[in-house]
Amino acid sequence: MSKTILASFALLAAVAAPVAAQEHVFKVGHTNAAGEIQDEGLQKMKELLEAKTDGAATLEIYPGGQLGDEAQSIEGVLLGSVDMSMPSNSMLSNYVEDFKIFDMPFLFPTIEGLGERVDENWDMMQASANAGGFQLLGVYSSGIRHLMTKKPVEAIEDLAGMKIRTMQNPVHVEAWRAYGANPTPMSYNELYGALQSGVVDGAEGASSAYDGMRFYEVAPDFALVGWLNMIAPVIMQKAAFDALPPNIQAALMESGREAAAWQRGYVEEQEQPLLDKFAELGATVTRPDSAPFRALSEALYESQLTTPGQQALLKAMTE
């Protein structure tokens, strides 16, 4: 074989080597801003996945709704046009009905406690996800959700008639109607403009979103209601997951769950510094009595959790 041919083979090998080293690139879409707590969790998962596979697998992360809003990204996972998504549970529970229990108000008082219950009942959650066509890779936290408004809310009575943006989720809508507000479902990507223009008077959301999306610019009042301890599951299509080599499957599961544990701790660490930051930015932080909110939430458990699967998962999570 001539030196010219050998040199050509060597050149081809050198060009192909980087491509072969990264055999699995998973595109992940989410709607939060880059650098928010959910995005940080995915960056941790990417780091772990690359380490566990010696660079053979990685995540390509698209924040800020670049791959579509939450409903579009979930549909993309089911259709195979998006490899992974990290939607709010409140949108995913429209597809995995057992997960509706995680939409219920005041169910878990702390992120740590919620994480412990998720870990204890992982197999049960995975079975529910699989039944919907998804593989569950991790359960991240979206934080404890409060209320951002254009005027201060000191008590539940202040909500009377206020247009409050909610997610497109029936439990959220019914909860805020019960609290006396006028719930207005809309896409997260539309919220800043809706607050700015007065289409809505406020929105429920986490401290991290209030900071990351700079909502304090258009809703300078933040009421610590703590009505929902929300999760953000990381999902991919089950059929696509099942088609992967076993070592990649294992690396995805390990990196997803390890990153989720890290991310939930990170969220808890960020809460108080964020509240301190809001005060420095000139936002008004109030602390309404949560008792009326809790009392009005009780009826939702009976009206919203109606299937055997929901009731079984609720029982497992709360026993």
Image (cartoon, grey):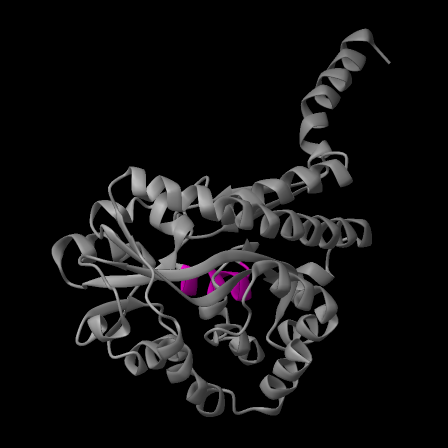
Quarter of the image with the C terminus in it: bottom right
Q: Position of residue 151 (x, y in %)?
A: 17, 58
Residue 72 in magenta stretch: yes
Residue 39 in magenta stretch: no
Location of residue 48 (image quadrant): top right
- Against 5, residue 110 (above or below) is below
Q: Position of residue 42 (x, y in %)?
A: 57, 46
- Against 248, residue 177 (above or below) is below
Note whether residue 145 is visible: yes
Q: Position of residue 186 (x, y in %)?
A: 28, 66
The residue lying furthest to the top in this view is 3
Left or right for 199, reference 14: left
Q: Specify start and end residues of the magenta stretch as a single range.
A: 70-80
* Residue sitting at x 20%, y 49%: 218
Q: Position of residue 247 (x, y in %)?
A: 81, 49
* Residue sitting at x 52%, y 55%: 82
* Prevailing secondary structure of the magenta residues: helix
